[in-house]
Image (spheres, helix red, strand yellow):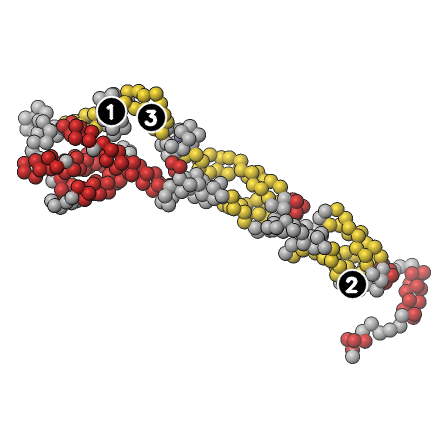
Amino acid sequence: MDFYIVLGVDRAASVSDVKRAYRRLARKYHPDINPGDREAEAFFLRVTEAYETLIDPDRRQDYDVNGGRHVGPPVGEVEFQGFDFSGITAARDESASTFGDLFADVFVNSAASRTSGTGGGGVDLHARVGVAFEEAMKGGERELTLTRVARCDVCGGSGVRRDVEVRCPECAGSGQLRWTRGHMVFSRQCVQCRGSGRRSQRPCGACRTEGVVSRTEVVVVPIPAGVIDGMRLRMARQGSAGSRGGEAGDLYVTVTVEPHPVFERDGDDLRLVVPIAVHEAALGARVEVPTVSGSATVRVPPGTQSGQRFRLRGRGAPSPQSGERGDLVVSVRIVLPRILDERSKELMREFGRVNSEDVRAELLG
Ligand SMILES: [Zn+2]
Ligand SMILES: [Zn+2]
């Protein structure tokens, strides 16, 4: 095993070259990123050994001269010289901050890559709610049940739980992990406690160190007064939570407004067709009409034609942006009575004789 080949650096590599190579490999092969992968663990061990050796000027020189044959004491096997990495613990103490920095980097990046690949940010969620026409006019709230990634309550999103300082369960307090493979005896610093043998925090079991859990929750969606059919409401940071403190995504709620049997929306105006009787159209009348906020009276002047429009200012729909109300536009439709009795028929004949002007004069020229 050539340390330079393991790290993929050349013999003239600087300390920062070595660090960079190590960081790159640690991101890929660290046991915490590849849980249960023995091959990755074994390779990571070699990478770590190479890094520990090449980062230390004395040991690097020794390695360059002696080819690393003196690294670690023999462990009592005749035909094979075992590796023992315990000798590097002392050197590690002085580079402890560097070591910690390297891993902080690894953990942040692995956490980010596991969620969405955009710096630990949570994903946006999309939902639909249907509201009745009246509800859309008044506004209100809607409860929405959705399953989203939420911050872990147990660890507050950090992925670790603070504990009273205890003996590290990973290494039983020794700060070292030892194992044999074939004739080789391995030992390395315990990653969990970084060689201290003591642990004051432990991985959060509730979220498996992700800092987030999947949870079904009720979200209250505020429905703005005057919401328009098909409108999309954005609820900032109400989407899925980001991993380990990463910013949450947004929740987008598309609102469907049920049509109303008589009111029709046109921008912020509402349209309403009002039937009026012949005599009301001819003689004029005060007609009571419904609005979305109680009834109103429309004054129909004498001689009103079918289809004529009247505008009731401020009786339309509220603007979802400004809250200002549009108008209610009333179109009248003249409805003839079903004339069956002789008296009514006679009156209509009489009416026709008195008003004998040609109503189609303009049409025929
Ligand atoms: Zn947790
Ligand atoms: Zn430990």
Left/right of residue 177 with respect to residue 75 in the rendered view: right
Vertical placement of residue 8 versus 285, above or below: above
Going from the N terminus, do you reach mark 2 or mark 3 first? 3
Q: Is residue 101 left or right of residue 295?
A: left
Give SS at disc 3.
strand
The residue that mark 1 highlights is: 196
Residue nearest the observer in this picture, 31 or 160: 160
Compared to residue 60, the image places residue 205 above or below, namely above
Q: Quadrant of the C terminus?
A: bottom right
Mark 1 element type: loop
Residue type at mark 2: give it. Ser
Which residue does the numbered mark 2 point to in the structure image? 306
Amino acid carrying mark 1 in the image? Ser
Query: Is the residue marked 1 within 8 Å of ligand 2, measured from its CB?
Result: yes
Amino acid residing under circle 3: Gln
What residue would you read off at disc 3? 201
Q: Residues within 10 Å of mark 3 (few under 14, many from 20)?
A: some
* Residue at 59% in and 50% down: 321
Q: Position of residue 170 (x, y in %)?
A: 26, 24
Asked if the residue under mark 3 is in contact with the one under mark 2, i.e. CB atoms within 8 Å, the reply is no
**Residue sitting at 80 percent across and 73 percent down?**
360
Quadrant, the N terminus: top left
> Tag 1 or tag 2, which sits nearer the N-term?
1
Rounded to the nearest angstrom, the CA distance separating label 3 from label 1 is: 13 Å
Ligand 1 image position (quadrant) = top left
Q: Is residue 75 left or right of residue 134?
A: left
Report if residue 349 is visible in the image: no
* CA neighbours of label 2 inside 10 A, class few (<14), some (14 to 19), many (20+): some
Q: Position of residue 26 (x, y in %)?
A: 24, 39
Q: Nearer the viewer, mark 2 or mark 3?
A: 3
